[in-house]
Amino acid sequence: PKRIYTFRQGDAERTADAVAALGLKGANLAVLASLDAPVPPGFTIATHAWRETKGAGGDLPQALKADLRSAVEWLEGVTGRRFGGDRRPLLLAVRTSAGTQMPGLAESVLDVGLTDRTVDVVAAELSDSDFAYRSYRRFIESYAALVFDADLAEFEDLSDREKDRVGWTVEPRNVSEWRMLIARYHDFLERELDAVVPQTPLQQLVEVVQASFASWRSLPAANHRMLHAVPENAGLAITVHAMIFNERNQKSGRGRAVSRDLSTGAPQLAGEFSIGGRIEAFDEPPEPIDLASFVEQGAPSFSPVFTELAGHVRRIEAHAGDAVEVEFMVGDGSLFLMQYRPARRSAGEAVRVAVELVSDGIIEQQEAILRIDPASLDLLLHPTIDRDAGLTVLARGMGASPGAACGEIAFTSERAQAMAADERPVILVRNETHPEDIHGMHVAEGVLTIRGGTTSHAAVVARGIGKPCVTGAGSLRINAASGTLHAGDRVLKEGDRITIDGSSGEVIEGEVRLIRPSLSGDFATLMEFADGARRMGVRTNAETPHEARAARSFGAEGIGLCRTEHMFFEGDRIQSMREMILASDETGRRRALAKLLPIQRSDFIELFEIMAGLPVTIRLLDPPLHEFLPNSDTEIVETAQKLAVDEAVVRQRIAALQEFNPMLGHRGCRLAISYPEIAEMQARAIFEAAIEAGERAGAAVVPEIMIPLVSLRRELDFLKSRIDAVAAKVMEERGRRIDYLVGTMIELPRAIIRADSIAEAAEFFSFGTNDLTQTVYGISRDDAANFLSTYVRQGILDRDPFQTIDVEGVGEMIALACEKARRTKPDISLGVCGEQGGDPASIAFFEETGLDYVSCSPYRVPIARLAAAQSAI
Ligand code: PEP
Ligand code: MG
């Protein structure tokens, strides 16, 4: 293979697998050159030569030296300059070029070719001896640092002493003072390091290349390779090109140009630029100026350069098919491009640029869809923390519902409501939340729990209502007695401000500035692209009008899960619910249920109207009744008073409903089988609402009634016959026909195994992956956080199976159930409504399995639309 590849504007020697052979910079310069961009002419010494050198024990082999000589001759021909020449000497920049960014590699060495002799030739050519000597001084320093491992601080001391001795201030004032300084440098190197900077340019080049190659073995580079699995044998390439004097004068400079204004997507140069001509070559570079304003101010001497730059940047963008960032230099009014890469950008910028690239005809819609990370959309839908502000992190938990929120600490839902009523922003801080915390969660800006994982009650509810939530912040401690929150030795009390980041899981002290999202037209356009490309439907999990509206505005195509139990916690409804639970017989229960009926009916009417003809899946009551009863003594007393029953009765009932394993206990369809009147009331509310909403809105509603936690076909048969009976009755009463579906959730292993038989009785299946994961693994979804993080850290699990589907276990069971169900009912509708319905990796699996739709919390709907599109492409 070739050892050296040359490049110049309009022409580059190409090779297959350019990055592996030439490294990033080398491959990049070759592309720029062949796009006819003005690159400085030069050549790249390929990784193959590095391997040869390594094989030869580290010294450049003769053959490589010969090739180097020819390459330099070629460059002399191209530039019309001579390396070490007495007129127009050629000077070179030497840079390492690895296949990936890597620390520990040799720094660039500039002005290779300067010697005690050529420095004066350059000074005469440029009529600027200060510039020439300044460059020479820098060259000696970087050469000595790289080749002799010299300490740069020694040169600084040396120069300080010379300054004091001779009396100059910033730098030598004339050639003779410069020469004295350089002579000190030479003396020092010879005396202290027994080293001499070669006065033959070719020898300089050979030594710099050799030492640069050796930097591949530096400790930081080796560590980086180990960490990022870069093979040691990948090797290093080196680019060598003619020097550009970008610091020479006020017509010189360097900058970074981005092809688009990333905040609008508009094609327009952005970036920064700094004008050269620095006095002190060792200072930090001057503050860069914003390129756009620089162009606007119409700096006359640069305007032709920037016009030229804009043209090249356009062409590079079209070639790359993406917004690019270009590094460039200007040497005495001439433009040179050094490197390009895809522009770094935020999620919002990425969306805007992808959409603009489609409308500019540079990429196809599919490409735009694939370019955006669905998870990054989260950041567009929620406020984020201004990371520029100094942050004091009190604790880290799990990011359970995205977005950031700040507010005052409230330890109970009652206090949260009271504080919110005073217009104070609240963060509800609880050990864990329970259904009765719903109110507190609704009024809070965000929710923080000490326990629980990403499918805990707090997490699920917070995602549903779009509130930021951090769960499992286990290092925090609530002291209920003193009403304090302890984070290490910091103590916070009610009313103290904290900020939570539901994306990163951080809990931060005090109020942090938040950046508000704005959903631009480009976001909507990207979503349209996605809708055109996806096969699966996207519904939402919603029960309140607020959630349903939010979900529709995010493009939900119906409700895939309405958890009716949440509706019973609103306002006074909990009282009727408690009355029903406390009733001693069916008559008592029916009396209480009659009070709930109109409330449920109007809830459903509202949902149906918001969803305007789209499918709405309503799940019958699911949680154990215990969850509806009061917890604290005061609440028990209150409840007894309100319902005019004896306090002892309430306590007895609470005790009777206590279960060892409530999640595996008296819940789901088991409740409805024990108390069919509950299911009948719910069914009646649904049918009456469907008729009324249909009459009002004129849109036909086809409610889908969903029965939870089924494991036996006969459970379904039992309940379906009762629901059908209610339907028949309502239709007769109202004199109207309604279409409806009765289906089941699949959340238990037995239901999977019997899916063929269950499908005969069901019109649809919806996989409840939260409970299914819990029951397939036998891991409690509410207690999993305590040990799952250890599993993930120890590499026993790659991810939390409650967040992303466990394809090999739970996934295989879902696939099995689909296959079995379709065997007995080919056109059965199959969906998923667990948390994984909004997880991009899980969505890819659901697409593969051929599910008809996913259902997820409102704020995840756009993510699911995009992820579904990506998995269908
Ligand atoms: C499920 O189990 O996946 C589900 C959607 O139901 P819930 O989370 O309400 O138990
Ligand atoms: Mg469930």
Image: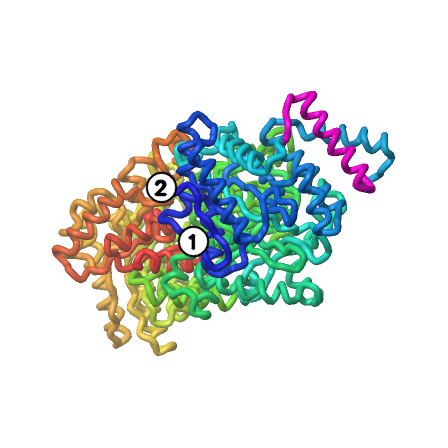
Seen from the viewer's position, the closer of residues 402 and 607 is 402
Q: Quadrant of residue 809?
A: top left
Q: Quadrant of residue 786?
A: top left
Residue drawn at (37%, 39%) of the image: 799
How many marks the image carries: the answer is: 2
Residue drawn at (21%, 46%) of the image: 711
Amino acid type at circle 2 is Pro
In the image, residue 397 sits, relative to residue 843, either above or below, namely: above
Q: Position of residue 271 (x, y in %)?
A: 61, 57
Amino acid type at circle 1 is Asp
Residue drawn at (51%, 32%) of the image: 210
Q: Which residues are magenta?
A: 171-197
Per the picture, the main secondary structure of the magenta-coloured stretch is: helix
Residue receiving disc 1: 373
Residue 302 visible (yes or no): yes
Position of the C terminus, as image quadrant, is bottom left
In the image, residue 367 sits, relative to residue 461, either above or below, namely: below
Residue drawn at (42%, 68%) of the image: 606
Q: Position of residue 812 (x, y in %)?
A: 23, 44
Callout 1: 10 Å neighbours few (<14), some, many (20+)? some
Q: Is 305 placed left or right of 178 in the picture?
A: left
Residue receiving disc 2: 1
